[in-house]
Image (cartoon, rainbow, N blue to C red):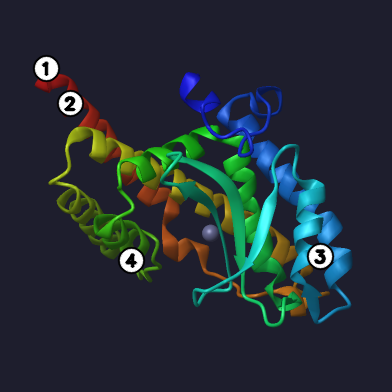
């Protein structure tokens, strides 16, 4: 696929490493994260803090060539996040960064489960070049804008506590209506790109929270000090939200075809 090979070569693994069905790629991303846990755990179990450069080095030992991570001090309020850096001059992304909460270049080992979560996002980028390609389209079309913040960051990526099935039905309906309403001024290309990106982001959150949860289950008794936060994944309703986005996406593509 031509659009993928055009991505900066520092961002993707050779095709022979990433090829396979979606499920096979999921397994590859999961296994890479497991590998990381295996080398990371012995470094953190008897320490309170770890140098940011040590974490960066450990991650880079695990990442397949030519992928590299750059760890930076997180300027935001959250503990950790992973992202790509986009160049408006070259109109492409050129590196991955992980932002971590740190003090004097030291990271608390109580952030271990959060770092594992972020590592899984990185593994998803590496083994699903479509995630990267879509994110690049988002940058190029200027779609990480107010509408995105309003619809994804401050709405879809939020937890909701639901007590019964009727309430859930109402909530899901509101989600569908809100997404449609927020995107209604977009042309079909903008709409489809945004919806596809939402689907990938939600899927990667589901992957990352699930793998973080597996890690927590395995370690919480022996090493409770490594658990950043135990999240109630159900309250995100990622699977339901993915289904809603896919439904709107299908409708949008159908309408688009019938316009011509
Ligand atoms: Zn995440």
Q: For mark 4, does the 10 Å Cα neighbourhood hold few (<14), some (14 to 19), or many (20 or more) residues?
A: few
Mark 3 or 1, nearer chain start: 3
At mark 3, the secondary structure is helix
Above or below for 120 versus 10: below
Q: Mark 1 points at which residue?
A: 260
Q: Residue at x 89, y 65 (%)?
A: 42
Between marks 4 and 2, how big is the CA–CA gap? 28 Å
Q: Quadrant of residue 107?
A: bottom right
How crowded pointer 2 is (Cα within 10 Å; few <14, some 14-19, many 20+) is rated as some
Residue 121 visible in rendering: no
Q: Which mark is residue 154?
A: 4
Please give the name of the residue rendered at 31% of the width and 43% of the height, measured from the top-left corner.
Answer: 194
> Which residue extends farthest front?
89
- On screen, residue 32 versus residue 148, left or right, reads right
Alpha carbons under labels 2 and 1: distance apart: 7 Å
State the residue position of label 2. 256
Q: Which mark is residue 54?
A: 3
Residue 56: x and y in percent read 75, 60
What is the distance, in whole Å, between disc 3 and disc 1 at their CAs? 56 Å
Q: What element carries label 4?
A: helix
Mark 1 burial class by Cα count in 10 Å: few <14, some 14-19, many 20+: few
């Amino acid at each position: 696929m031509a659009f993928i090979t055009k991505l900066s070569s520092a961002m993707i693994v050779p095709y022979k490493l990433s090829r396979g069905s979606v499920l096979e790629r999921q397994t590859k991303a999961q296994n890479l994260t497991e590998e990381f846990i295996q080398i990371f755990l012995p470094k953190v179990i008897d320490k309170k803090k770890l140098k940011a450069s040590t974490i960066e080095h450990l991650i880079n030992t695990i990442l397949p060539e030519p992928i590299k991570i750059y760890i930076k001090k997180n300027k935001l309020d959250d503990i950790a996040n992973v992202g790509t850096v986009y160049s408006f001059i070259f109109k492409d992304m050129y590196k991955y960064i992980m932002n971590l909460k740190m003090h004097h270049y030291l990271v608390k080992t109580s952030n271990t489960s959060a770092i594992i979560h972020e590592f899984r996002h990185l593994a998803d980028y590496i083994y699903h070049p479509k995630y990267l390609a879509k994110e690049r389209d988002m940058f190029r079309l200027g779609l990480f804008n107010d509408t995105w913040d309003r619809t994804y960051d401050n709405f879809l990526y939020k937890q909701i506590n639901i007590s019964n099935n009727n309430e859930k039905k109402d909530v899901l309906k509101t989600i569908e209506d809100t997404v449609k309403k927020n995107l209604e001024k977009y042309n079909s290309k903008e709409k489809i790109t945004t919806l596809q990106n939402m689907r990938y982001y939600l899927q990667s959150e589901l992957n990352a929270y699930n793998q973080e949860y597996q890690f927590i289950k395995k370690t919480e008794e022996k090493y409770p000090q490594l658990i950043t936060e135990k999240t109630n994944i159900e309250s995100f309703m990622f699977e339901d939200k993915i289904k809603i986005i896919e439904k709107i996406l299908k409708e949008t593509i159908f309408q688009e075809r019938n316009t011509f």
